[in-house]
Image (tube, helix red, strand yellow):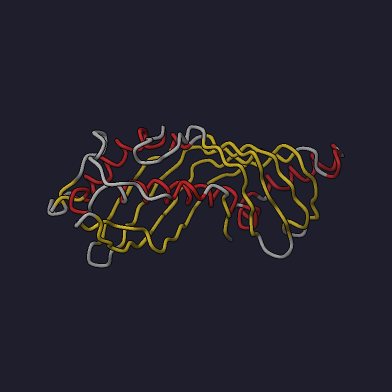
């Protein structure tokens, strides 16, 4: 499954400049390098989520997305518009590991609560259940863990080496998800209530089919912040020798 987000302009590479004071580099030769990166990453995260014009990061509290198209397979069409994402300020880093030999970074983040609110349009089947409609939607996930791995390529700018994100992968585990789709079946309240009850009673199976709406947002945030920070300063200034 993949999510297509209509805000690609956020991936514009940043120009080289002095790191903001809230980003504190760690020494890769230190025995506690991973712990240092994790702790200082958590210190910097609230500032990054509030936006930074120098890093070309928007305010993500809440994060506003004009459109999300969810590729959930041939049995269902699902899209969202005018989306607000709340709860990114509940995200905390628990692991931050850099493998310089393999040019990879692995992070684990936990989110207490993330909510996606917007307008939906859906038609098809979820599991074996026919579903159709359009209107307001609320998807909330609680107590989630996201394991994000990305490789990076080294590129030279201004005579120094920078890291640029290459391939990436996101694995996830969500303890509980809540779904609310209003005005299903042309506003038939009884059918709408029955379907929403079914979705919430089978939240883990439903997530496998339409969870990309939330998962893709988390991956997009991780990639956006990672690309902006890595593109802002040379590797040796972000991770001291």
Q: Position of residue 220 (x, y in %)?
A: 48, 50
In the picture, the quarter occupied by the N terminus is: bottom right
Which is more toward the observer, 127 or 29?
Answer: 29
| Residue located at (13% from left, 51% from top) | 30
Seen as rendered, the residue at the extreme front is 158
Left-right relation of 149 to 140: left
Please state, as top left, top right, bottom left or bottom right, where the C terminus lies in the image: bottom left
Number of marks in picture: 0
Residue 164 in the figure: left or right of residue 222: left
Q: Is residue 21 above or below residue 161?
A: above
Position of residue 78 in the picture relative to residue 35 (left or right)? right
Q: Position of residue 121 (x, y in %)?
A: 74, 47
The residue at the point 73 percent across, 41 percent down is 181
**Extreme residue toward the bottom, this view:** 102
**Percent position (x, y) of residue 139?**
62, 41
Foreground residue among 186 and 199: 186
The residue that appears at 64% across and 49% down in the rendered structure is 203
In this rendering, is residue 50 above or below 175? Answer: above
Q: In this view, does 34 lie above or below 156?
A: above
Q: Where is residue 43 in the image (x, y as percent from the top left)?
A: 29, 35
Q: Quadrant of residue 4?
A: bottom right
Q: Residue at x 57, y 59 (%)?
A: 2
């Amino acid at each position: 499954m993949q999510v297509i987000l209509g805000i690609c302009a956020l991936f514009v590479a940043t120009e080289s400049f002095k790191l903001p004071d809230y980003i504190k580099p760690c020494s890769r030769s230190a025995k506690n390098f991973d712990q240092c990166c994790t702790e200082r990453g958590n210190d910097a995260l609230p500032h990054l989520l509030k936006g930074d014009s120098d890093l070309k990061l928007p305010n993500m509290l809440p994060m506003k997305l004009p459109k999300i198209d969810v590729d959930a397979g041939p049995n269902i069409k699902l899209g969202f518009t005018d989306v607000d994402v709340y709860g990114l300020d509940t995200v905390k880093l628990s692991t931050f590991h850099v493998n310089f030999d393999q040019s990879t970074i692995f992070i684990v983040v936990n989110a207490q609560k993330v909510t996606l609110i917007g307008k939906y349009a859906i038609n098809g089947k979820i599991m074996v259940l026919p579903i159709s409609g359009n209107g307001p939607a609320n998807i909330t996930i609680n107590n989630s863990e996201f394991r994000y791995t990305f490789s990076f390529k080294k590129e030279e700018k201004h005579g120094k080496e920078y890291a640029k994100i290459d391939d990436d992968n996101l694995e996830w585990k969500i303890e509980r998800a809540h779904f609310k789709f209003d005005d299903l079946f042309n506003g038939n309240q009884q059918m709408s209530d029955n379907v929403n009850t079914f979705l919430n009673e089978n939240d883990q199976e439903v997530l496998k089919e339409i969870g990309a709406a939330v998962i893709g947002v988390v991956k997009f945030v991780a990639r956006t912040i990672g690309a902006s920070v890595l593109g802002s300063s040379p590797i040796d200034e972000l991770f001291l020798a």
